[in-house]
Image: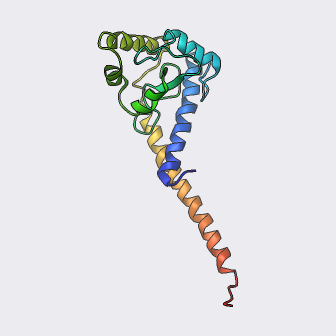
Amino acid sequence: MAKSKSDISNSAIRIFLQDVGKFYDKERGLDPLTPSLKVSQKKELLEYFDHACCFCKTQIDLKSLSKDHLIPMNNTHLGLHAWGNVVPCRKTFNNEKQQKPWAKFILIKAEPDEAAKRSELIHSFVKKMHYDPELNLHKYADSLYEDIGAVAMTLINLRYKQAEDAIKQLTFSSE
């Protein structure tokens, strides 16, 4: 459950980025990625990356696969949940990478002679999927972030006032 106005706004941004990602995939003639990825989508990612983590080349399968957003799906970076931005990785790497740029993360995780190859593979995947990492949605996302926070606080204040009025109507007796 959201604990603050920013939590509510951040959740809205993630939903927005998923929905825009679906539309973006459709516009590029692709079957939109589902939030948790269908088995067929996981298989396609694994096949493209030779059944290996995109960052370190460790072999992974359907059970050990985790998905990572190359460009993080948040209010700062605005990466979409869409083909070309979602890649297969080791589960531990997904949490460890956080908001680090993926190109720097590869340098930390891949063997020195493998880093350039992994980076090239990711670039070719992004290009093949026609994903634009420079897609700028800040105008819309920034407005949404502020709007959602304001609407949420208006509704919270309304319900608070209603609860306050209901409590005032109670009769409290001292026994």
Residue 174, percent across and down? Answer: 66, 90
Point 64% across, 75% down: residue: 165
Question: In the image, 47: left or right of 171?
Answer: left
Residue 6, percent across and down? Answer: 47, 50
Most foreground residue, 52 or 42:
52
Residue 107, percent across and down? Answer: 31, 20
Most foreground residue, 137 or 4:
4
Most foreground residue, 26 or 64:
64
Residue 30 visible in rendering: no
Point 60% across, 18% down: residue: 41
Outermost residue toward the bottom? 175
Question: In the image, 131: left or right of 33?
Answer: left
Q: Vertically, is 41 above or below 17?
A: above
Task: Determine which quarter of the picture holds residue 19.
Answer: top right
Q: Vertically, is 174 above or below 84?
A: below
Task: Determine which quarter of the picture holds residue 137.
Answer: top left
Question: In the image, 36: left or right of 126?
Answer: right
Point 64% across, 19% down: residue: 39
Q: Vertically, is 39 above or below 159?
A: above
